[in-house]
Image: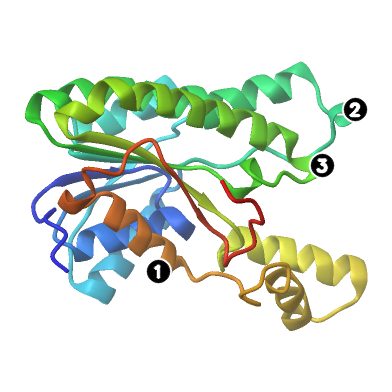
Amino acid sequence: MDLGINGRKAMVCASSKGLGLACATALAREGAQVWINGRDAARLEAAQARIAREIGASVMAVVGDLDTAEGRAALLAACPDPDILVNNNHGPRPGKLDMLEEADFLAALHANMLSPLALIKAVVGGMRARKFGRIVNITSAQVLMPAPEMGLSVSARAGLMAMAKVLQFDCVADNVTVNNLLPGPFDTDRLASLAQQQVAQEGITLEQAYARIGARGPSGRVGQPHEFGDACAFLCAAQAGYISGQCLTLDGGAYRGLF
């Protein structure tokens, strides 16, 4: 399927690795002009090279910490009028309420709610004026099925999703959609770190750790990043203009609710 985004400008946040990189790769494959972002210049260069090697596309790289106004300004200066914004950022540390301080909550809200909202606010007006825009927020399946120690992540990301729902009522009439992607376990560096923790704590092999993680859902496996990237690309497609205010969970069927 031709997704109709050839030549569209796409800003993909926190995209030097993992799911962000998968989204950037999928959009570049569809012919979009892509700006990738991260805090580590060397890792960004490696991501550029990987995309060029895999699909023969050239993408622009912007070094910047999205938790800071300066980092967001650098990204917006490099791509001031994106047609596509994929919001992504690192998650906060796990911990139950008695382990957390006010500073932990403020940091989580800033990274996973306020910073992405600042980027949305900066670009949505231009999208509406041009009558095309696709905003995709990468959050987490934990928002629907939270683990006890993931309260920081769930709280901040749920706030972002609530504001995204409110925003889309105003902008969808101008062909600007706002949706959320909620990933379950995917084969990324973050999952590898969690698997290594299980290896150290339980004395099992890495293969067994991955098998246990995959067995939590009926698919019996973890997701592959390219599956996530392709889902993101479709939500950014010209054909997806009637999909807005939605939360798409990618977790191999693990979510047990109806809605």
Q: Which residue is drawn at the image coordinates 29% and 63% (left, top)?
A: 26
- 63 lies above or below 130: below
Q: Residue 157 or 63: which is nearer the viewer?
A: 157
Q: Earlier in the sequence, mark 1 or mark 2?
A: 2
Image point 10% across, 23% down: which residue? 129
> Which residue lies under the disc numbered 2?
98
Q: Where is residue 16 in the image (x, y as percent from the top left)?
A: 41, 54
Residue ID at (77%, 74%): 212
Q: What element carries label 3?
A: helix
Using the image as rendered, state which of residue 45 and residue 29 is in the foreground.
29
Determine whether, in the image, residue 190 is placed left or right of residue 196. left
Please give the label number shown on residue 195. Answer: none
Kind of element beneath mark 1: helix
The quadrant of the rendering that contains the N terminus is bottom left
* Coordinates of residue 24 in the picture (x, y in percent): 31, 56
Q: Which residue corresponds to mark 3?
A: 148
Question: Label 1, on which residue?
Answer: 226
For badge 3, the amino acid type reads Pro
Mark 1 touches mark 2? (CB < 8 Å): no
Instruction: Give the mark nearest the N terminus, 3 or 1.
Output: 3
Q: What element carries label 2?
A: helix
